[in-house]
Every structure is written in structure tokens, then in C-alpha cells.
Amino acid sequence: MKRIWFILFGLFFLVSSVTGAVGVEKPKKPSAIYKVDTDKKLVALTFDISWGEKYAHPVLDVLANKNVPQATFFLSGPWTLTHPDVVQRIAAMNYEIGSHGHKHKNFSEHSNEWIEEQVQLAEKAIMQVAGVKPNLIRTPNGDFNERVIKKLNDMGYQVIQWDTDSLDWMKPGVDKIIHRVVSRVHAGDIILMHASDSCPQTPEALPVIIDELRKKGYEFVSVTELMKLQR
């Protein structure tokens, strides 16, 4: 009898070991995308807009003059409704439009119900003005936690962050913005810039950044196109 139990115990231990080794993959924690691992020299220029109208058109003028084929704009709901001409120009230029939420408040400090309401308000505004339903979101202030990401994923959104922050929002000076981006850029990078009135130096820095990155062999794509290269 003891021998039988010994054999059974051994078989149980063996099966447990094999199952643990082969195992079932643990579900990945919800996460945001900061960059894409790729050897291709592709980067995504992204622009957040939540306030003002002075610099949005100049940024679009630069992109048009420099023949940048793809870029991604994250737009807040209220701004979208009050600046339909800019939004429609972005759409007409075939640039990608993502959500930047509605109220510019940290999602992690609010309930899932509040988050859902905010995202739906922004989504409705973007659909009304641009005629597109966004599936990318950059949360206000880049704020999130695991709960927020899961909620947004459940709503059909991918949370997009950045790996290179131009710091244009700090107004450090045109040369510093240029140097920061050009010195930090890498293949698969998502670059954060702004086209809000709080970032007056962006239109002047942007053309130089585009020229310098092209000299380094980089091409510009949307965040969605970049994500297709995810390994």
C-alpha cells in the first residue's frame, strides 16, 4: 500500500513540475505603449491639444510644408467642439486622431464611472466634428494606473504614452526643444509634442526637428502604423 501511495505521489509531483514548467502564461498586466521595439527607423510624432488656437494651424503648416505624411493628434473633447476648423483640417490632412479625454483631470483620482463618462464625451465630440471614432487615448497629464488602463482597454482604447518628451510645454527655448528630441530619438520612438497655446515654441522647433531626424534616416508614421511593428 505504501508503495502505491509513493508511486502516486511521485506521479503527482512529476505532473505538477511539468505543468509548472510548461504552464499557462500568466495574463499580462494592462499597460500603456511608450515605444515599439523595432529596428526600422520609424518614429511617431504626436501632438496633444487641449487649449487655444494660436499654434495649432502653424504646427499643421509646418507638417504640410515639410511633407510629413503621418502624425497623431490627441484632442480633448471641449477643444474639439470649440475649434472644429482645426480638427477638420487635421482630418483632411489624413492625420490620425486620438482622444485626450474631456476634462483635463487625472483619471487615477476618479472612479471608473467618471472615466467612462469623460471618455464618452470626448469620443462623441471627435465623432461629431471629425467623423472618426478614436481608439487611442492619451490620458490628461499622462496620468494612469493599472485600474485606469484596464477600464480604458475594456472600452476599446489603447493607452499611448511617449518615450521622448520634447518638454515644449515647459517653454525651455527652441534650441533646447530641438536638442532634446534629436539627441534622444530612437527607432520605434513615440515623441510627445503639443500644439496648444501653452507651447509657443513648438512651431519654430518643429521644422528643425523634422529636418534633423530625416538626416538621421528617420521616417514619420502614425502611432497605429508604428504599433503594427510591435514584436
Image (tube, rainbow, N blue to C red):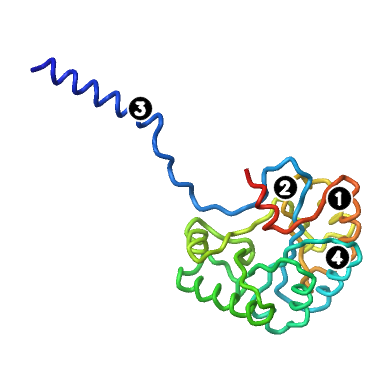
Q: Earlier in the sequence, mark 3 or mark 4?
A: 3
**Residue located beneath label 3 in the image:** 18
Q: Residue at x 65, y 51 (%)?
A: 228
Query: Mark 4: which secondary structure?
Result: helix
Q: CA distance from mark 1 to mark 4?
A: 14 Å
Q: Which residue is mark 4?
A: 63
Amino acid of disc 3: Val
Residue toward you, 2 or 196: 2
Distance of label 1 from label 2 (alpha carbons)? 13 Å
Residue 27 spot, x, y in % from top left: 44, 46
* Residue for point 51% across, 53% down: 30
- Determine the residue positioned at 77% across, 58% down: 45
**Residue 53, numbered circle:** none
The crowding category of the residue bearing disc 1, from other C-alpha atoms within 10 Å (few below 14, some 14 to 19, many at least 20), is: many
Amino acid type, mark 4: Leu
Quadrant location of the N terminus in the rendered image: top left
**Closest to the observer: 209 or 87?**
87
Amino acid at dot 2: Gly
Residue 188 is labelled as 2
